[in-house]
Image (tube, rainbow, N blue to C red):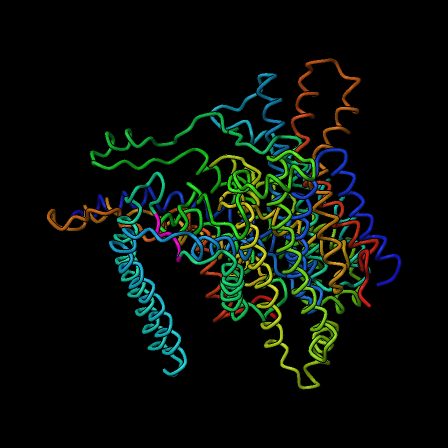
Amino acid sequence: MNYRNISLFGMIFLFLIIVGFSQSWNVAFGLLNLCLLSAIMALGVNIQWGYAGLFSIGTVGFVALGGVAAVVTSMPPVEEAWRTGGPGILTAMLTAIITIIAATQIWKRVSAGIIRNLLMIAVLVGGFFLFRGMLDPAAAIIEKINPAGEGYLGGLGLPVIFSWLVGGLFAAGAAWVIGKISLGLRADYLAIATLGIAEIIIAVIKNEDWLTRGVKNVIGIPRPTAYEVDLQKSETFINNVNWLGMEVIEASSLYVKFSYGILFVIVLAIILWMSEKALNSPWGRMMRAIRDNEEAAEAMGKDVTKRHLQVFILGSAVCGIAGAMMTSLDGLLTPQSYQPLRFTFLIWVMVIVGGSGNNWGAVLGGFLLWFFWIEVEPMGHWILSILTSGMAEGSSLKEHLLDSAAHMRLITMGAILLLTLRFAPKGLIPEK
Amino acid sequence: MDILHALIVLANFIIVPAIAYGSQLALGALGITLVVGVLRFSNFAHGETMAFGTMIVILMTWLFTAIGLSIYPLPTALLALPFGIIGCIAIVLLTDKFVYKFYRKAKSTPVVLVMASLGVTFIMNGLIRFIIGPGDQRFADGARFIIKARDFKTMTGFKEGLAIKVTQSITLVTAIIVVAALFWFLNKTRTGKSMRAYSDNEDLALLSGINPERVVMITWIIVAILATVAGTLYGLDKTFKPFTYFQLLLPMFAAAVVGGLGNPVGAIVGGFIIAFSEISFTYAYKKVFTYLLPADWAPTSLVQLLSTDYKFAVSFSILVLVLLFRPTGLFKGQST
């Protein structure tokens, strides 16, 4: 860390403090929390792209898996659903696993030829019908139970903090499957495959109501922190607030945001510390060697595909953790909110702008770009209203332009990416 | 047993739509595969290129309808198509000049070009939403059906109808014309031959005096034509929505990879494979089985393999299968 980097971080905190004074501290802390989450996601992408040069554009899928983890670990179980539909769902899942294991075993053990292909197809097709035959009726039963409030399995009812780890595990599992298939082929195949898996994960979350309630959203996911309502009733809290001379309602929501912030800072610090250690270890040097010259690294006896798989899983897991954290911050899972623009593309821009290959750079990019992302829309509106001020009131072109201000985000983010790639490919804090 | 009726149902709900959708995908995949062949990177902005060309076609269609120009019974969009193509060529050549050319000269790795194309994707997407909005636009006018389901029933006396939309037949005819012209160009003209030579072996082509910048420019022009035609046909047949065009990227890539990246014939075959599997995996076969099976065996459920929301899963699975078992695609394409 030199003075330049410290001043870059100082600038962001200055921005946040300005927001705190000019708008409200609630807004500032809300921004800070999402900045922290963005920084964690950016670290995940940085592990993949910065360390190893893997171009994976399925971040949104891994983040969404983290969100599912938050639901299935922490929501209270819907007991009736478990009793009536649970066995069906479990046997269906078991069937799916057995089918896949059987198919891979056939692939490994039977000698190549038409018989092997036919056997595999038979097992896969048969397994699929069995799976659907068990899943569909069970899902139908579950979705009928109190559809307005439940209609899904619920979760395990564990403390929500655990789900952060589970989110990481979910994402790692998905990454393992994708990595196995597409790593070792030409570089763009990983991009296509991750794009596809992200679409499918989101389609599953939107449509499998028995798991995530689909578009009906899951609300009221337990929190790792106190609730505003409880704080407002607590004597000690009210006394403390009065002593500080603040309003109880505002103070309570500030307190909640602050406690989330502390938890997030702890997670960010742990991940950042581990990333730094890994990057500066022999493992990290090997990764960079592979990134810079695959042939040479392979000639030195490094198993490039295996290392790529490893780093891809690690990066995805970090994104999954961040996804679970975000869902527990929101307290709800809304499948429609998982937009590739917001969760894949924006994170990528953060890494590139911050400085790919440098963990502090990714964190800086996360903070800076999130701040920018929030502020671009009002800025776009402001610029357009100046540009259109000369036009006649109520002209249709003027209204169209003002309505379109929201799309400025897309253009600005694309332009930032292209300009950084072209003129400052190393980013704000370049790799050492 | 009523095989004839079952066949009519299949034709109406699977074969006819899949031929139209397959032609659209094939045209899209051809564009992707040409960029891979000549420029050697996967162009993630291809969906947006399609949408951009289509947007100009839509704007011109509105203009023509406003001044009362029409070619009834054909949709006005066909008249606007050349303008869309010109607009699309302009934007594609501009992006090449300002974005891709730099990396080409610097001999960057394909990944950097792919990333740049992602940046282009978002700028184009933003522009499109800025100009025409993110919502649905229907711009198909003119006659709607060549054969209506009811007319088919009265004409033939069958219980099931077979409807063929005007847009479906236009899609097929246009696709055949465009593909024939493309193959004539690639195989018979000097420029087309130089393009193929450049795609096969860059160094050898340079040695024999082929101007690479010219080859690149012509490739972009062809890609823009293909993209606008594909996008307009898709929009006429279904509807125009910017986000749908972005999502088309996955089936189109799957089509290009299935056929073998860089191989034009493969892209066409791949397009039809993806279209047929996507539609036949997500179609509910209840009616077909009702005709085929004895009355008391008739299915009570929809007999649908996958709900239509999972159509991406179909193209994705095909993509994965090809990557696992035959990374060069069905026809020899580039690999690793």
Q: Is residue A238 magenta?
A: no
Q: Judge by depth and name the residue closer to the eye, B315 or A138.
A: A138
* Position of residue B242 measured from the top left corner of the image (x, y, whole percent): 58, 38
Q: Judge by depth and name the residue closer to the eye, A367 or B164.
A: A367
Q: Judge by depth and name the residue closer to the eye, A313 or A275.
A: A275
Residue at x-position 58% and y-position 62%: B261
Q: Is residue B327 above or below residue B277?
A: below
In the shown orientation, is residue B200 left or right of residue B278?
A: right
The outermost residue toward the top is A393
* Position of residue B111 measured from the top left corner of the image (x, y, whole percent): 69, 62
Q: Main secondary structure of the magenta part?
A: loop
* Position of residue A234 measured from the top left corner of the image (x, y, whole percent): 53, 42
Q: How many marks?
A: 0
In the shown orientation, is residue B134 left or right of residue A298?
A: left
Whether residue B296 is visible, yes or no, is yes
* Quadrant housing residue A263: bottom right
The outermost residue toward the right is A3
Magenta extent? A152-156
Whether residue A200 is visible, yes or no, is no
* Position of residue A39 measured from the top left corner of the image (x, y, whole percent): 68, 55
Q: Judge by depth and name the residue closer to the eye, B282 or B94.
A: B282
Quadrant of the frame with the C terminus of chain B? bottom right
